[in-house]
Every structure is written in C-alpha cells, then in structure tokens.
Image: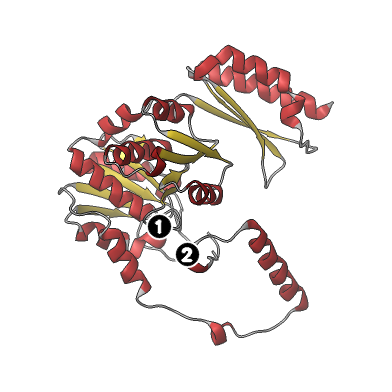
Amino acid sequence: NGIKFFAAGGHKLSDELEAELESALDSVVAAAVEFDLSADSNSDTHAVAEWCDAVASSVVAVAPMRIVIDCANGAASLVAPGIFRGLGLEVEVLHAQPDGRNINDACGSTHPEDLQRAVLASGAALGLAFDGDADRLLAVDERGELVDGDQLIALFARDLRERGELAGNRVVVTVMSNLGFRLAMDEQGIEVVETPVGDRHVLEALARTSSSLGGEQSGHIVFADRATTGDGVLSGVQLVDLVGRTQTPLSTLAAGVMDRLPQVLRNVRLEHRRDDIAEAIAVEIAAVEQSLGARGRVLIRLSGTEPLVRVMVEAPTLAQAEDAAGNLAAAVIQACSA
C-alpha cells in the first residue's frame, strides 16, 4: 500500500493526470529540490467520524448476529470494530494491531485462513476480511467457506434489482470475473458491462453508464450511489444487512446466486515480450473455445508490470480447465520462441 491521490469530489485520478504527477515528482527527485510539505497541508480531523456515520447510516437496522472481522493490521483497524458494534452486532476482531510493518502479513483478504478458523470456532454467522487499505472485502460464510467478490457482487445485484435500486438493471465487472457470474446475471435479466482489469476502469464505466454497482473478483466493490471508490467496510455493512434482512445463512445465499465455474490461471514468463500473442495463437484459442462451448471461456492477456502472459481458462470441470490452460500455455511458449 502506497500513497493515493484523489481528485476533487473524491474520484480517482485519470491515467493521464497520474502520469503528469509522476513526471513532476521524478523531476523534483532528480533536481534534489527541498520543500516544506507542512506549508500547504490540511488535515480534516472530522473526516473519519463523518465517514463512519455515513457508512453506518447506509442501512436502517441490522439484525443481531455474531460476526468476525479481519482488519489486516491496516486502515480498518481503528474504525471497523466500532462501526459494526455500533450496529448492535457481537464482533470478534482479528489482526487490528498495526505497527507499520505487519499490514497484510498473513492476514486480511489475501490470507483469510485465520478468519475461516475463527468463524468456525466461534459459531459466527459470517466473517469479513478487509485488505490493508480497506477498499476490498471478501467474506467467509458460517461453514468457513470463502465467498469471493464475484459472489458478493452477484448477491448485491440480485438484492438491489429485487428492491428496484439497481440503476439501469446493470452491473459493471472486469474481464476476470467468473463466467458463472455472467451466466447468473443473464438468467436474472441483469446486463453485464465488462471492463479491463482494475478498479479504475470499473469506476469509469460506472460513471459512463450511470450504473450503481460494480466491482472485481478480488473484492473491490463500488456502490456508486454511496461512494466514489471501493469501500470494504461499506460493503461489509451492506452484506450484514442483506443476511439479516433475508434471514438466510450466507452459505445458502452464495450457493443460490451463481455457480462458479472452475477457473485456472497460468502465468507464462517470457524472454521476449510479444504484444500480438493472442493473435499469434488465435487458432489454438478458437479450438479450445469450440471444445468448451457456452460454459467455457479463454482470456489471454499480457501483464502490465511483468514479462508475463496470463492464460486464464474457465470450463465445466477443473480437469478440462487445467488441460486447456496447459495446452494454451505451451502454445504461448512456442509462439514466443519462434
């Protein structure tokens, strides 16, 4: 987790403006310019309290239940326990002692094992796992099973549609969302808008299409009528509210909202980058897609930060997905060595 910049209105900066800032910063560092940050700084001591009130007031009332939250020794540590207890919930808190070094260290949404064990041991209704900067949420059901971002977005989309609050009857997700999510939304008559990977692209599409819900499989979830960015604590409050209102265990809700298709990801390291790799193995991709049919999908994309090609395959069975991903990874290696 690093420094984040936001534009007026609380929105993320555009790629172009971020590039300008980076260029300006590089110039300052190269010139070894000294300057006093305190001269133009401003701190709003009421902002945290106002945010807590806004998150808590996003629901009318929450049914009493026991939950476990994992704060990832990060931003949620000082605020999330109070918000959930203020809603009348019995809350067990994990990993809420940040020391500046232990953030995301074997905890939080990237390492939910402690949370899964705690939910089972305590008999909690559910668990909530935040990441270090608390803009992501993954959940654990009462059986200790992980509920990922796709499943959570599907639950929220169905609930909002049933209440007439899903703007445009539409949801925004990235190309990495599970095919099972798209099939489930199709069955419910909800339009799915796809974007490239990254919450910034989701935010841009939400604004462009006037949609109210979007997110990523990783747990970035945006309620555009309540926030300008992903907010894990807000998402957690919405989930607790949903489970309480429906009086239905999270495991039942998650199992009924979508069928996750087996997904296999292969990272193929390249000695030489090839930007046209998807076109180079188009014949192999087409053959796999034909064999998998409507319940399968292939995604080939270059990493933006490493010399890697990411090969993702979804299929009706794990064996089919692994076999197809292996064949496509081999095709990538052959095409890049030719």
Determine which quarter of the picture holds residue 7: bottom right
Residue at x 74%, y 79% (from the top left corner) = 32
Q: Find residue 79 and report its horizontal and vertical position in percent.
A: 32, 64
Kind of residue at disc 2: Gly
Mark 1 vs mark 2, CA separation in Å: 9 Å
Q: Is residue 198 visible?
A: yes
| Numbered badge on residue 227 | 1
Question: Quadrant of the rendered structure where residue 74 is?
Answer: bottom left
Whether residue 5 sits left or right of residue 218 in the image: it is: right
Please rate how many residues cluster around mark 2, counting C-alpha atoms within 10 Å: few if below 14, some from 14 to 19, many from 20: few
Q: Residues within 10 Å of mark 1 (few under 14, many from 20)?
A: some
**Which residue is located at x 64 percent, y 62 percent?**
18
- Report the residue that reaches farthest toward the top: 291
Residue 222 vs residue 79, the one in the foreground? 222
Q: Is residue 120 above or below residue 314?
A: below
Colour scheme of the rendered structure: secondary structure
Q: Quadrant of residue 57?
A: bottom left
Which of pointers 1 and 2 lies earlier in the amino acid sequence?
2
Residue located beneath label 2 in the image: 10
Residues tagged 1 and 2 counted as in contact (Cβ below 8 A): yes
Badge number at residue 107: none
Residue 16's place in the image compared with 244, above or below, is: below
What amino acid does circle 1 point to? Ala
**Residue 286: image location, x then y, percent:** 66, 18
Which x, y percent locates residue 137? 39, 48
Query: Which residue is painted at 47% across and 66% down in the image?
Result: 9
Q: Nearer the viewer, residue 148 or 162?
A: 162
Q: Secondary structure at mark 2?
A: helix
The kind of secondary structure element at disc 1 is loop
